[in-house]
Image (cartoon, rainbow, N blue to C red):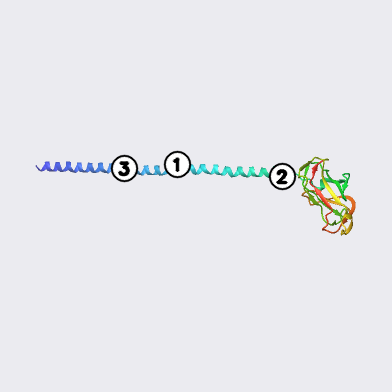
Amino acid sequence: MRPQRITNGLLCTTAAAAFALLLTACGPSQPATQGTTEPATSSTTPGTQAAPETSAPPSSSASPQSEPASTSAGPKSTAAGTLLCKASGLKATTDATGGGAAGSVYMELILTNSGKAPCHLKGFAGVSLVTGPSGQPIGAPATRDTSVAVQDVLLAPGKSGTAVLRYTQAGNYPDCSKTAAAGFRIYPPEDTASLFVARPSDACSNASIELLSIGAFQAR
């Protein structure tokens, strides 16, 4: 009977050892599977989030570059189409064949484009009686006669624009302090430089007496 107990004990011990080995072999395999899955999941997630971040900047950076190009082109074309006639490119004369009435003389103030490029006149010239080509103005400058509408007069090289200039005789004013004038100083519209037209006449040094009036330029 004793040998059987020993044999049974050995069988039980062997079976227990085999079961323990089986548990040991099966146990580590589960943590190993979980360890490889987690890094794979975490590494793919940042990759999918990074794609929108890299594609967004090119579309936003392209539009600011195109906007300055369109705005910078506008002022160039506007400036190129705006050419005012300046005193340096004009010749001034007067034509007094228009006659006179009631102590006034009506004449044409003529500005001719003496330059090589077209320019335009628009509005009223500044006109004063002066003591000489470089002399001082005498009395009041010309007032504006608005009876004729303002026009934009394009002057090709050699072409002229005219405005009606009226001179009232100084003798019509008993309180006029007469002073000899050598002619007219002419300022083209929107210009600070002037031209001189010789025409000796009497002027009034009284600033309250207005001997001159000027109309808007018209095409000749």
Residue 167 spot, x, y in % from top left: 86, 50
The mark closer to the camera, 3 or 1, is: 1
Query: Residue 152, labelled with which disc?
Result: none
Would residue 9 be found to the left or right of residue 115 on screen? left
Structural crowding at the residue carrying mark 2, measured as other residues with C-alpha within 10 Å and reported as few (<14), some (14–19) or many (≥20): few
Q: Does dot 3 land on a helix, a strand or a loop?
A: helix
Q: Does dot 2 land on a helix, a strand or a loop?
A: helix
Q: Is residue 100 visible?
A: yes
Q: Tell me what residue is drawn at x 67 percent, y 43 percent.
A: 74
Relative depth, front residue between 57 and 176: 176
| Pointers 2 and 3 in contact (C-beta within 8 Å) | no
The mark closer to the camera, 2 or 1, is: 2
Which residue in the structure is indicated by mark 1?
Answer: 48
Which residue in the structure is indicated by mark 3?
Answer: 30
**Alpha carbons under labels 2 and 3: distance apart:** 80 Å
Q: Establish if 42 lies above or below 175.
A: above
Which residue type does callout 3 highlight? Gln
**Alpha carbons under labels 3 and 1: distance apart:** 28 Å
Q: Is residue 181 visible?
A: no
**Residue furthest out toward the left:** 1
